Image (tube, helix red, strand yellow):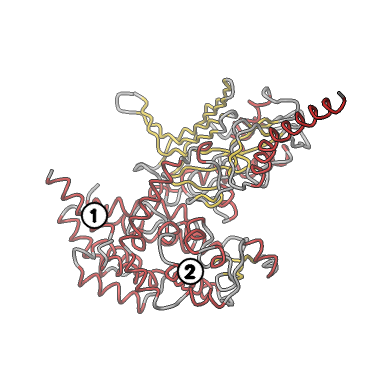
Amino acid sequence: MKRKWLNAVSTLALAFVMLLLPIFSTVDGSKQTKNYVDYTTQTRTISADESVIDYESIFNEYEDAKLETNGSLTTFEGRQVLNLADLEELDEVSKKELEGEQLNIKYKYSFDYVTDKVTLTAVSIKDTEDGEIQEEIIDTIEGTAFINEAGNIDAVLDIDGEQYLLSELQEAGMVEGCGLFKKLFKAIKKVTKTVVGVVGAIATVAVPAVIGVVGAITGVGLVATVVVGAVAGATIASATAAASTAQQNNGKVDWETVGICAGVGAVVGAVVSGAAYGITKAVQAAKAAKAAKAAEETTKTAETVSKAMSGTEKVSKGTGYKSFDAFKKANGPAGKDQAWHHIVEQNSNNVSKFGANSIHNTGNLVKIPSGYKGSLHSKITGLYNSKAFDITGDASITVRQWLSTKSFDFQYEFGVSKLLEFAKELGITIVLP
Amino acid sequence: MENIKKIEKFKTVCVNRYNALYVENNYVKGNRLEKKIIELGQELIVSQRGVEELKNLLSDGNEIVRYYVASIIISLYPEESILVLKDIEQNGQTHLASNVKYVLLNYQEKNNYFEKFLANSKAEKSK
């Protein structure tokens, strides 16, 4: 009887283990997958040192400043009169033709802390001959805030149909930018610093040329502070801060639908989940198709140029690694104000085409000055992020996108020649592989 | 906008685009100005008058302006444009000198943006 009972228990236990085995395997497997999309709610708790913001001084910068909160949506509106003469190159970088000596600009800002959508709009206001007030949108930039893999706040901005990572722009020193918001930025820079000081722990995201977008979720008065931001920053940050005071959640900020994808995006490097942030797969597919077409058209070009210098030869003599981390482990860090730079870039397209061993290879990596505005690294990155119809034969793709469709040797030759060119300009010597 | 105004603006935008990318290291600003160059180039290249005015810029005193104009009208005036580009490649003082080979290769490969734009415009008109 006892033996029968033991047998039954053993059988049940075995069945139970067999049932659970695939479940555990799945869980374990998901942990090992790097390119995942996580839609779970994430919580961050950040301390603030103080809790006072001088809204008055910020609002004084504007006429008819208005701040409203409706549910999760916060909006700010304010007007400023700008002298065109003070705005260098404004006429060229704004989307609309601007006439006259002065511009009456209404800035509109909105931030939704549930969807993380941030929008900044500049509207010109004119009085018509009939006494009517005519409003015309000069520029709009939309962005989406998210928490990156390192746990910091970042944002993806859509500028003229291109996606830019705010952190990338900040690193490149382009935050102050130019154009419409230039004066505004200068005027509020001091205030921004004050606000930043007040709220304490902050992940500031500012914007590049023309427009900045600062969003904020701030638990002022208690301890939760997270600021996601823009150039119109102080105003916006404080505006949102004020609005979201009521929305604070015991010192915690809940981020809903934060999809963090470890994959490398074609446009902005390591970015976020397309589904979560509007960088849809459809857009990426369209860009890839366009790039593939460009590749087809210029294959012969690549072959011609590659004869001048062979990156393949360099790499065949070098040592390859399965990852960049493995390379750095073996070769050490680049050092202060230096970075390891991949001559043929380490994007997913290149890695799958040429193999990790060719990309993370001593023949393809070079140590160059980095981490400050005007560094060799920022210059070469800027060129790769630029659009150049003359080089690419296309008005819509960046040099990086164009290059990624080329052969290894073509990319290598292009990368080396530009590195040498910029190094010469900066008066520095680099040791090529 | 009158053509004269457009030409003046075109020249300014070309120089500012170059400066944004290579001097100020601000590619976002550079990309916006690049778009502006394309817009102005398209507006000018569709009219005979505009094309002639662009052609005159092949002898402009500024290397940056000459480079962009040659890149735009190379399919319409290949001889003159290639001459200008070759000169920039050999004697140029800007970063554009090293880009000349790509402009020339694109032209050979019929991958010039404005050539494709003109072909599309003609196709649209004939519909």
Residue depicted at 45% across the width and 42% down the height: A281
* Residue corresponding to mark 1: B4
Q: Secondary structure at mark 2?
A: helix
Q: Which numbered marker is on residue B76?
A: none
Vertical comparison of A50 with B60: above or below: above
Of residues A156 and A217, which is closer to you in this image?
A156
Q: Residue furthest top?
A: A70
Please indicate whether residue B51 sits to the left or right of residue A38 in the image.
Answer: left
Q: Which numbered marker is on residue A415?
A: 2
Q: Residue furthest left?
A: B126
Of residues A219 and A332, which is closer to you in this image?
A332
Q: Position of residue B5 (x, y in %)?
A: 26, 52
Q: Position of residue A243 (x, y in %)?
A: 63, 25
Q: Quadrant of residue A272?
A: top right
Name the front one of labels 1 and 2.
Answer: 2
- Quadrant, the N terminus of chain A: top right
Q: Quadrant of residue A230?
A: top right
